[in-house]
Image: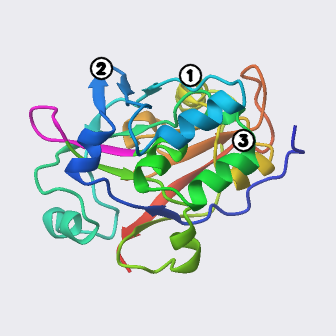
Amino acid sequence: MAAAAPLKGLPDLKMGNLNKKEVVQIGVAKHQSSYVVDLDTELLQPLLQLAQDSRKYVSPKGLLTPMEEIVAPPDVHDLSAWKKDVKIDSKAVLFCFAFPLPGIDRLEPDSVKQLLETGTHAMCFAINGGFVYFDTNSKIVGIKPVVNGLKVVVDLPESPEFTTMRFGAPVTLPNSGALRRTAELAARPPTILPLIESGIQAFTWLSAKDDTDGRGNSSGMFAYLYGLDDQPHKHDCYFCVTSWSSP
């Protein structure tokens, strides 16, 4: 287990896009508070092969956070224009965060890193998770996977192909209260290597509605937990979204 090291800042999250064909190809479907994908599809087969070679099980069924209304960052006043800028479908009115597929965290990190480097946006969605967007009928109209780790992101971080989510300074997660309870209930193991190396045991996306104490902001936040068995840890923290834009 990695030694716990406090996150002094959260790196920018780079978000890609799954086109409609890719969404159909990997068979993404929502079922209540979870989603499923088809690991046998060509786009995800290398992940399935890695799991089999490692004698590990990766589930095709991942968890979703509760759906919430799309809200632009604090400095944005035209929601429609902002959605166009960050490549969110104009029909999208609701969204949620899709956690990485269960079992990814039990694979060898260096092997997962290699899959990401040479992978696709679909592979990034399975490994890193991402945001899923829905229309008024709760139909999926877009998926923005977290593409950190993809080689092209490392080589061309400001490519117009990606949008960037930026965060404020870390805020200590209170040892008790509604925000703590929600974070502990929802959190799942991280799969992004720098987070694992920091000793983080679990993470989750929290919406503004989860922040009943008014500590966060209207655009949501990511929370990171270092303790085991729901025990508060001095490094537990969250980062509020400050901006989300294209290069």
For disc 3, the marked residue is 236
Amino acid tagged 3: Asp
Q: Please identify the quarter of the rendering in which residue 107 is found.
A: top right
Depth check, front residue: 238 or 27: 27
For disc 1, the marked residue is 185
Q: Position of residue 86 (x, y in %)?
A: 29, 67
Under circle 2, the secondary element is strand
Residue 132 falls inside the magenta stretch = yes
Q: Is residue 95 visible?
A: no
Under circle 1, the secondary element is helix
Inter-mark Cα distance, 1 to 3? 14 Å
11 relative position to 125: left or right: right
Q: Nearer the viewer, mark 2 or mark 1?
A: 2
Q: Position of residue 241 (x, y in %)?
A: 46, 58
Q: Position of residue 115 (x, y in %)?
A: 60, 51
For disc 2, the marked residue is 31
Provide the residue span drawn in magenta.
131-140
Depth check, front residue: 41 or 196: 41
- Determine crowd level at label 1: few under 14, some 14-19, many 20+ residues with C-alpha closer than 10 A: few
Amino acid tagged 1: Leu
75 relative position to 99: left or right: left
Q: Quadrant of the C terminus?
A: bottom left
